[in-house]
Structure formats: structure tokens, C-alpha cells
Amino acid sequence: MSIPWIIAKKEIKLLFKSTRRILLLFMVPLIIIFLVILVGFIAIFVVPSTTSEQPEIIVIQADEGYNNTFWGNYFYLLLKTQNSTKDYIYTNETLNNFELVKEERKYDALIFIPQNFSQIINQSLPAQYYIFYDNSKINNEAVVINIAGISAVLNQELIFIEYGGPINLFRINTNTEGTSKGSGAMVASSLSIIPLYVILFLVFPPLTLVLISVTMEREQKTLESVLLQPIDRKQFITGKILYGILIILINTTLTVLSILIVLLTLFFALPADLKQELSPVLEILSDIITHLDFNAWLFIFYLVIGLIAISLLMVTAGVFFSLIAKDEREANMVISGITIFPLFGTFFLIFVPLDFLPEIFQTLIGVLPLLGYLFSIYQIILIGELTIAVWISLMFQFIWTILLVILAGKLIESEGILQISFKRILKFWKKNS
């Protein structure tokens, strides 16, 4: 067995002998179980009371028809006859009141069918209509998805659906045979929180464990004896990186298993009437997922590769900074600093529109470690496609990882490795600045 594997195996054994390390490892699954149980409790005891009131739908029909064909009327008839939407309360308004109704927002959902709706469909082109909804009510998202599902029945044609509340506005495409570019935007919108979640909850525990593993060896004076052994010191670095990768794999597996177990438990615990109400929504979502197009799969591929790159980056960063941190206190300072970085960057991207940023500034953000990947996800969601810039950003995450590995290798081979600390580095920097 190679030396890196021996080091990684030793660390895994030590992991399960420390209560603190075990808590760090199982922190994410425990949080997930708690949150999903909380959501399940709300779904069982709160949602049934809110769904007892039928949603109020305002329909503004401006379709003038084409060759005595009125697709707008046909669509309205479908809404009032299909199982998923027939129980809604529908109210008709005139086109003159469109702006007034939209501003008053006295509706759960507002459907606007434009004048050329029938004409465009009869020309075998994608027609479009608009759904505005009140996103302050938990049930309205399902209402909009149900209405969107009815679009697929229309003449086997692609119907563009734009809907948005006071906060967000995004587009999905629906047809009976598959989905188009908009499905990627819908998937991106649904998954936009995942990169930050993974970085904070799946990657940072392994980062913490890697930092602790090296700093504890320095505090216990065992690192010196390891470095005095007749082995290549770079193998020590490789072993620690391998240990971090194994921790991420264990952490991810535990998280996925905990999600599956809790979701299955909640599914069987849900009342039968609530399952029946949710079934149309689940069918529509299942249809969208099973008909994802190339752009959607490309985004998922980018997401997965990016998370792998960030995982490797965090592990190598943990190894590198652990060689500098003299004790656990300095290691905790590193963890706090790295944690603030993605949080600050994410809030910056939320509150500062992309159009306000100079192009050179956007490029600089894109190549930053960690934050560049979050910024690339933001760009994909905003633009709706994967540009060359986002691939360059992904490439730089791997470049930063390689640079950290090289720096860690140089650092471990230096003669004064055991005397290095953040405190000494800061003193040296102040002295020479």
C-alpha cells in the first residue's frame, strides 16, 4: 500500500475516534433531517388548511382569433375542464383593465392571452401568454405549474410561459414532446441555491477536518517526527488531500442517503388527500425532468464538474493553510475567513445587477477562486446559456487547485516549515510594508 493511502487510512481511523470530528462529519445529514421534518410538519398541518381555499384566477382574453379559430377560447375551456385546474375560481376581465388589475394584485394568478395568440399557433410558430402570480402564498406555485401543464395540450405546439411575482421573473417552455432552451433556465433557477449550499455544508466540514488533522499534529509535536522520516514530503501532502477527498465522498453519501430516507418517510406519512393534490404537480415535474434537452443536461454537467472542482480546491486550500496555521485557533481564523468569502460574494451578486459591473470587473470576478464559480452560475441563470466566460471560470478553479498543490509541496519541503505561522507571516509583512 502506498504512503498516501496509509496516511489517509490512518486519518479515517482517527476520525471515528473523536466525538468532535464525528459531529462535523454528521452535521449536514442531521441538519437535513431536522429541516425536512420541519417542512414535512408544515406540509401536513399547515398546507391542508391553506389549500382548502380555491385559488382565484383572473383571465384577460385579448385573442382575436384567426380564420374563425380561437385558440385562446380553447385554452380557457381546457383550464375549466381539466382535473388539475377545473376547480379554480375564474373571473374574466377586459383588456382595458389589464394594467389596473395587474397593479392591484387582487388575484392568485393573472392569465393574459395576447391578440395574436391564435394567429401564431395557426402559423405553426410558438405562441406565448403570460401568467402573473402572487408568490406570497405557498400554494400559488403549484397553481401556476398546473396551468402551465395545460399548455402542452394546445395543438402539439410549443407554448412559452412567462410568470413572475414581485421578486422574480423567469421563463419555462412546455410541449408534449420535450422541452427547449427554457427548461435549462427552469433547472438553473431551481438549482441556483445548490452551489452555495454545497460549498457551505458539504465542503466546509471536510475543509475543517483537514485543517484540524494537520494543526493537531503540529500541536502534539507528531508532525516533526513524520517529516523526519526518510520519505518524500510531498507524499504527506498527497495523503492529506486524499483524506479530504474521502471525507467529501463520505459526507456526500451520508447527505444523499439522509435526504432519500427522510423524503421516503415523509411521503408515506403524508395524508392521502394531500398526496392526491400534489400528484398533478409531481407528474408535470417528472415530465419536465424526463424531457430535459441538451442545454439542460449541459448545465447539470457544468454544475457537477464545478462542484468537483470546488471540492478539490477546498481540500487543497485546507492542506495549504494547515501548513501555515500554528494551532487550532489560527485554523479557525482561516475557516471563518474562507466562509465569509462566498457569503459576501453571493450577497454582492444578489444586490448588484450584472449590467452595472464593468466588463473587466466581471472578468476578474470570474477567475477568482470559489467566488468565480458562484458568479458563473449566476451568469448562466441570467443569460440562459453557457458562454465561453463560464467555462474559463471553471478552468481557473482547477488552475487555483494546481497552484495550491504546488505551493503546499514547496512549503512542506522548506527547512523552516515547523516555524511558519500566520502570526510570523503578518509580522514579516508589516515589517517590510
Image (cartoon, grey):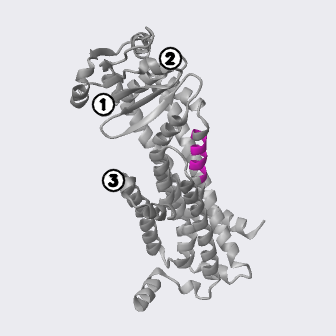
Element marked by disc 2: helix
Q: Position of residue 322 (x, y in %)?
A: 54, 73
Element marked by disc 1: loop
Name the quadrant containing residue 171: top left
Which of the two labelled residues, at mark 1 and mark 2, occupies the earlier sequence position? Answer: 2
Q: Which residue is located at x 56 percent, y 66 percent?
A: 210
Question: Callout 3: 10 Å neighbours few (<14), some, many (20+)?
Answer: few
What kind of secondary structure does the magenta stretch mostly adopt? Answer: helix
Name the quadrant containing residue 135: top left
Q: Which residue is mark 2?
A: 122
Q: Amino acid at mark 1?
A: Asp
Asked if residue 330 is positioned above or below residue 433 in the image, the reply reads: above
Which of the two labelled residues, at mark 2 and mark 3, occupies the earlier sequence position? Answer: 2
Asked if residue 299 is positioned above or below residue 343 in the image, the reply reads: above
The stretch in magenta equals 296-305
Q: Which residue is mark 1?
A: 134
Name the quadrant containing residue 410: bottom right
Element marked by disc 3: helix
